[in-house]
Image (tube, rainbow, N blue to C red):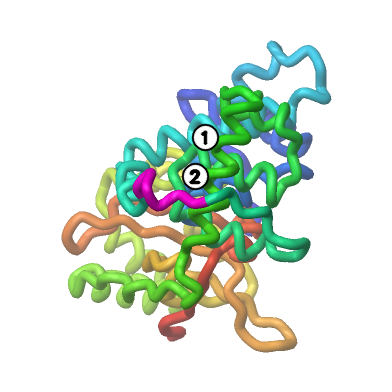
Amino acid sequence: MTMQPRLEPAGLFDVRYVAFLETVMHLRERLHRYCARMTGSALDGEDVMQETLFEIYRKIEKIDDPGALRSWLFRTAHNRCVDFLRNQQTRRRAEANFTADEIVLPAEPAGQGADRAIERLVIHLPPKERACILLKDVFDYSLEEIADLVGSTVGGVKAALSRGRAKLAALPSQPIVRPEPWRDPQLSRLLNRYVELFNRRDWDGVRALTSADAQLRVSDCFRGPLSESPYFVEYEKGNANWKMAIGAVDDEIVLLVLHRGEGGWKPVYPVRIEAAGSTVNRISDYYACPWLIRAARTVVVASSN
């Protein structure tokens, strides 16, 4: 897929922005990893990262020291993640799982090689503790750097690390069983029909499933009305070594684009579909984000037509 950048009224995805994205490409996977663990979702983490990148782009002239770009990115991403968590009321639910009486003496950070396990457990911590654990025990930032990124003091970071590590140590040793994603029968029928038509390359049929004012977001490329995009045309230009299937990423029902290689069909990126009744009103396509599947806790292909 080679969709060219489009310019929307707010100024997204013009040539200068694409050039900026190329300059920060080496930071993208690391930044997404942080956002995904903070939000608890690889998809939400990507959306937060996209917002972070555009915010930094609009302020890029204020950054005198190119070496400070990484700090600006992580600080902005952290603030946006916290806003996301507050909006989703995740912080209140996470904090309700623990009380001050349950906190024991600080646990030492896990040994080398355990960072992936830590990343998957921090979702049970409040945002500040979650951020401090990630930045220190996974990304190896100094206490001073973390204090700057999260807007705290070195003492505050130490306290958050102590609380967070103690809570992680107190988690049950048995793996946490996640409930099966809740399925809406009407949405399931719509997604099955969407996949069937997509795999038949019946673009008129796919368009008929979308509302007249459906919105499209293609990471790094386009945001605006689906009707003004070359979205389906770009897929039509693609080769035959791909197909779409219903699946789940981090327990969220999505569509997965599969590519065929020597080892058979493998998911390479998700497409998020939002619907109102039996009509698609929003599509978010993450084809430009190869790191997303790697960062997800779970990726399941539920069916492949």
Looking at the image, do the residues carrying marks 2 and 1 touch, with CB atoms under 8 Å apart?
yes
**Position of 49 relative to 249 (above/below):** above
Expressed as whole percent of the image width and height from the top left, the position of residue 37 reads 54, 52
**Position of 38 relative to 248 (above/below):** above
Give the magenta range.
99-104
Residue 45 seen anywhere in this rendered image of the structure: yes
Say whether residue 101 is magenta.
yes
Expressed as whole percent of the image width and height from the top left, the position of residue 82 reads 45, 35
Residue marked by disc 1: 51
Residue 237 seen anywhere in this rendered image of the structure: no
- Kind of residue at disc 2: Asp
**Position of 292 relative to 173 (above/below):** above
Which part of the image, by quadrant, shows the C terminus?
A: bottom left
Q: Quadrant of residue 195?
A: bottom left
Expressed as whole percent of the image width and height from the top left, the position of residue 10 reads 48, 24
Q: In this rendered view, identify the residue nearer to me: 173 or 27.
A: 173
Which part of the image, by quadrant, shows the N terminus?
A: bottom right
Residue marked by disc 2: 47
In the displayed structure image, the side of residue 183 where residue 133 appears, left or right? right
| Residues at marks 2 and 1, CA–CA distance in whole angstroms | 6 Å
